[in-house]
Amino acid sequence: LAACLLLAALLALWPRATRADAVELSSFSVVREDDAVLLSYVANFELPPSVENALQRGVPLHFEAHAALFQSRWYWRDKRVANGTLSWRLSYQPLTRTYRVGTGGLNQNFDTLAEALDSMRRRSRWKIADAAQLEDDGNHYVEFAFRLNTNMLPRPMQIGIGGETAWSLSVERTQRLE
């Protein structure tokens, strides 16, 4: 019994590790307008040192934002009304010492990593569905996820980062459509 109490006291005093690499949504809204359902978000995060080191060594990072609009149903599984995905490819160009963010066939170069990450951190008025796709019962919700897609890393790295929490940059949010 004394050993259990001692162990409990030590665990209570042990410094808890805070995840500085977690993604937080400082702003998130879903708005239904006359012709569309629009999503806006601001994701705050920094790359952990091991992820930034891999980027500096030439490993491209793939990020994605996924939104799905559902209609709640009591008699069956919820019906997926619409969904959308945005994806970015972040890479470092050592010869020019610039960062490149590619999305949908378009590439943009940035001088610093902070500028490159800022281009992915926020999206405003992203159209995820047409208003005509919604039924008038008003029972809809949106599931949103923003994450670092580790499935797009080279296969040897996928195996090597198996249990590392630094590579699990992600956030999820669910919100009812007003």
Image (spheres, rainbow, N blue to C red):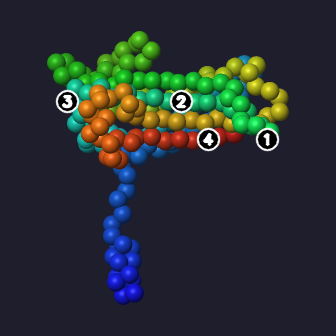
Mark 2 closeness class: few <14, some 14–19, many ≥20 residues within 10 Å: some
* Furthest residue in direction left, as rendered: 95
Q: Is residue 47 left or right of residue 56?
A: right
Q: Is residue 50 visible?
A: yes
Find disc 4 in the rendering and name its residue.
174
Above or below residue 163? Residue 56 is above
Residue that appears at 61% across and 41% down:
174
Q: Which residue is mark 3?
A: 57
Q: Nearer the viewer, residue 95 or 5?
A: 5
Instruction: Of the two numbered discs 2 and 3 on the same chain, state the one appearing first in sequence.
Output: 3
**Residue 137: x percent and y percent?**
83, 33
Asked if disc 3 and disc 4 are in contact, CB closer than 8 Å, the reply is: no
Name the residue nearer the viewer: 137 or 79: 79
Local SS, label 2: strand
Instruction: Please report whichever mark, 4 or 2, sits nearer to the chain's N-terminal start.
Output: 2
Looking at the image, do the residues carrying marks 1 and 3 touch, with CB atoms under 8 Å apart? no
Q: Secondary structure at mark 4?
A: strand
Q: Position of residue 160 (x, y in %)?
A: 26, 39
- Labelled pair 4, 1 in contact (Cβ < 8 Å): no
Quadrant where the C terminus sits is top right
Q: CA distance from mark 1 to mark 3?
A: 51 Å
Number of numbered callouts drawn = 4
Q: Which element carries disc 1, helix, strand or loop?
A: loop
Of the pair 58 and 77, the residue shown nearer to us:
77
Who comes first in sequence, dot 1 or dot 3? 3
**Separation of residues labelled 3 and 4 (CA atoms):** 36 Å
Q: Which residue is mark 2?
A: 66
Task: Looking at this view, name the residue that lies furthest to the bottom.
Answer: 2
